Amino acid sequence: MSRWHRVHLGVTYAFLYLPILVLMVLSFNKAGLPTAWSGFSVEWYGKLFANPKIQQAAFNSLVVALVSTLISTALGTALALGVERSRPSTVREALMFAPMIIPDIVLAIALLSFYTLLKFSLGLHSIILAHVVFNIAFVTAVVRARLKGFDWSLTEVSRDLGAGAFATFRHITFPLILPSVIAAALLAFTLSVDEFIIAYFTAGAGPSSTTLPMQIYAMIRFGVTPEINAMATIVMAVAFIALFTAQRLNKGHVPGM
C-alpha cells in the first residue's frame, strides 16, 4: 500500500470514528456539560442504569431484538436454502432484497398503512413483525454467501444412503452452514437493536412499546448530556462486538465445506 493510500485510509477512518471516540470519552466526563471536560467519572453510567425509563426501553429493545432475530433467522435461512436450489430468477432476486434497498421511511409508512388496513393493534408485537420483514433479506444474503461454495453432493450422498430430508438437513446441511447462520443472527440482532425509524412508526403509545433508540430520541430533544453519551456508548459497544463476531464467523468459511 502506497503512502498516499495510507494517508487516505487514515483520514477516512478519522472522519468515520473520531466523532464516536469523542462521544465515548465524554460519556466519562465528570462535568454536567457535554463538552467541557472536568475529570474522569463513571457517575453517568450509574445514573443511566438507575433510570426506570431507560431500563424499560432497554428491556423492550432486547425483547424485540431477540424475538425478531429468532424468527427472521429461521425464515431467512429457509429462504436462502430454497433459492439456492431453485432456478435463478431476476424478479425473485429483486423482490427478495427489496427491504434492503427501500428507504426505511418508505418501508415504515408501508407497514403502518398495512397494519391500519388490517386494524392490527400496535405495540411490541407490531415492531417485532416489522423488524422480521426488515431483517429477513439481510439474513438471506449472509446465508446465501455461505451456500455459494456449498458441496451439495454431500446431501445427495446422505439421501442415497437412506437419510430423509430432515435428517440430512440436521446432520449435514445445518452443521456446515451454522457459522453463517450465527453470523446472520448477530447481524439481525444488531440491526434490530439500532433500528429507529421503523420502530417509531409501528410502535404503540406509551413506554410499554418504547425501544432504546426511541428513548434516546426523546431525551436528546432536550439537549445532549453525558447520560445520553453513556447510553450511546453502550449501544455502539454491543453493535461493534456483534458485528465483529459475525465477521470472524464468516471468515471461517471454507469453500466446499
Image (spheres, rainbow, N blue to C red):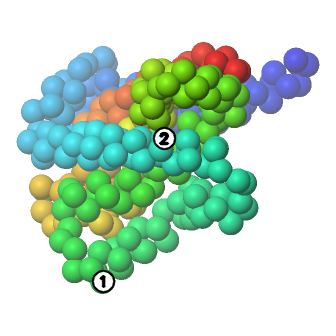
Q: Nearer the viewer, residue 122 or 58?
A: 122
Q: Is residue 116 above or below residue 127?
A: below
Q: Which residue is mark 2?
A: 77
Residue at 38 percent across and 71 percent down: it is 111
Q: Is residue 73 above or below residue 163?
A: below
**Classed neighbour count for the residue bearing mark 1: other residues with Cα under 10 Å, few (<14), some (14–19), many (≥20):** few
Mark 2 or mark 1: whose residue is earlier in sequence: 2
- Numbered label tally: 2
> SS at mark 2?
helix
Q: Residue at x 53, y 60 (%)?
A: 99
For the residue pair 41 and 214, the one nearer the viewer reads as 214
- State if disc 1 and disc 2 touch (CB < 8 Å): no
Residue at 60% across / 16% down in the picture?
Answer: 252
Say whether residue 92 is left or right of residue 199. right
Q: Position of residue 6 (x, y in %)?
A: 81, 21
Q: Which label number is shown at residue 117?
A: 1
- Note whether residue 240 is visible: no
Residue 19 percent coordinates (x, y): 52, 35
* Quadrant in which the N terminus is drawn: top right
Q: Position of residue 131 (x, y in %)?
A: 37, 54
Left/right of residue 164 with respect to residue 31 in the rendered view: right
Q: What residue lies at 47% left-to-right and 35% top-to-bottom?
A: 165
Callout 1 amino acid: Leu
Q: Which x, y percent locates residue 90? A: 73, 61
The quadrant where residue 115 appears: bottom left
